Structures are given as structure tokens and as C-alpha cells.
Amino acid sequence: VFACHGNHDHEAPAVVKQALDDNGIRLLIDEAHELETPAGPVQIVGMDFAFRDRATRMAKVCAAYPRKPDHLRIVLLHDPGAFPHLGEGEGDLVLAGHTHGGQIGLTSLGIPWTVVRSFGGRIPDQGLWARGTDRLYVHRGTGHYGFPLRFGVSAEESLLLIHRAPGATEQASLLVCCDHQSGASGGQIRLRSPDATSLQVWCARIFRPRRV
């Protein structure tokens, strides 16, 4: 299991680090980790949270940890508003949270509106987004932080099934479990190979990405 910092984690970084260590979760702070899975090699890059100079900071991390050949590259990036500042092609899949899905909205009623979208849609608020071949998934989280109100935006625990491209020499899939705990770590993922049941269930869930 891997995690990255969110903005509130900087309020008590030592406490967050100890809690993650106690639960066997590896915190990635502007660093990368490679691992082998039955679906192929995966490179995970964890970006620290920052409000300023995001493009420069992320470019330095990507330069220090360049893409590995034949690796799926997953980027943990707490704030989806930083996604446009990430270099194109630097993340096959970027996982974010931060917005709590908009926190206040009407999406649970089937109406695609949230408070975040009322700002002109500049920040992806929830779900799958696309920029070229890069994909961003924004997790809605499970609660709130600060302003004690959440309305019309359902909580979420996600399972994402990632497929190799059709032209790949081997067909394989990877199941990514995502979690964004409000007021805890910036985001966590767990990687495992799906069983037949998971393939049947989660292949049926199809996302149509929105463009960033």
C-alpha cells in the first residue's frame, strides 16, 4: 500500500508518518518506487503537496525519477488542480482527491453540478478525466474537513481495473484500490491482480472521461 501527502498532512507530518508506518503503508514524498506485479512492472511516483511552483516542483521530481521502460506509471497527486501542471506523458494514470468530490452538489441526484464546478470547471472535482493519453481519476473521499457540511455528493471507495493497451504483447489487468480519507493521508492505493470475479464485476463499470 502506498500513500502521498495531502495539504492537511503538513499540519502534523510526524503523526501522519507514524500512523502510516504502523499500518504498513509506504509514504512517497517526491519519490518513486518500482514493483513487479503479475500484470507487469509498475512505477509509482508520489508527489508532495504544494500550492506554489507546482510545475517546477513536479518537473524536478520527474527528472529525478524518469519513466522506466515498459512500466505502467502511476502518479499520486493529492490536488487534481495540479494535474495540468504535470508534464504530458508523465503519468499513465494520475490518482487525486482533495476536492471531496465537490463536497456540496447534486451529483447523487444524477445532476452533474458541484460547488467546485461552479467556479468554471477549472479544477476536476470527481471521476475520470483525460488529457491526451494521460488519465486522471479524482476520488470523492469519505467525509469533510473544516466546513462541517457535505450534501449531494456520495462518499466513495474505489476499485479501478487497469488494462494493458490492445497492442501489448501480453494481455493482463491490474486492480487498483483507491482511498482518500478526509483529514488523514493525501491518498492511498493498494495494488493486486484481480480474480475472475473482480474482472467480471469491474469490467462492467465503464467511465467516459472528461477533458482537462
Image: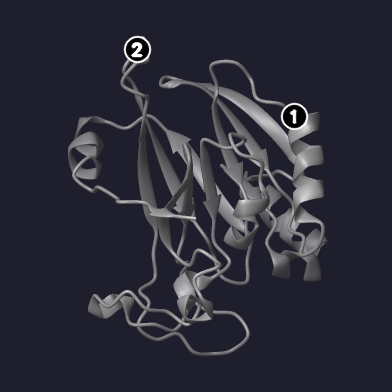
Q: Amino acid at mark 1?
A: Tyr
The percent coordinates of residue 145 (x first, y second) are 60, 80
Residue 6 point in image, percent of width and height:
68, 62
Q: Which mark is residue 81?
A: none
Percent x, y for residue 113?
37, 78
Where's the N terminus, which quadrant?
top right
Residue 175, image x, y percentages: 38, 37
Label 1 SS:
loop
- Between discs 2 and 1, the one toward the N terminus: 1
Residue assigned mark 1: 65
Residue ID for mark 2: 170
Residue at horizontal 39 percent and vertical 86 percent from the top: 151
Task: Verify CB contact (< 8 Å) between mark 2 and mark 1.
Answer: no
Residue type at mark 2: give it: Glu
Left or right: where does residue 75 sit relative to residue 18?
Answer: left
Q: Closest to the observer: 51 or 15? A: 51
Q: Looking at this view, name the residue that lies furthest to the bottom.
A: 148
Out of 71 and 134, give the one closest to the viewer.
Answer: 134
15 lies above or below 176: below
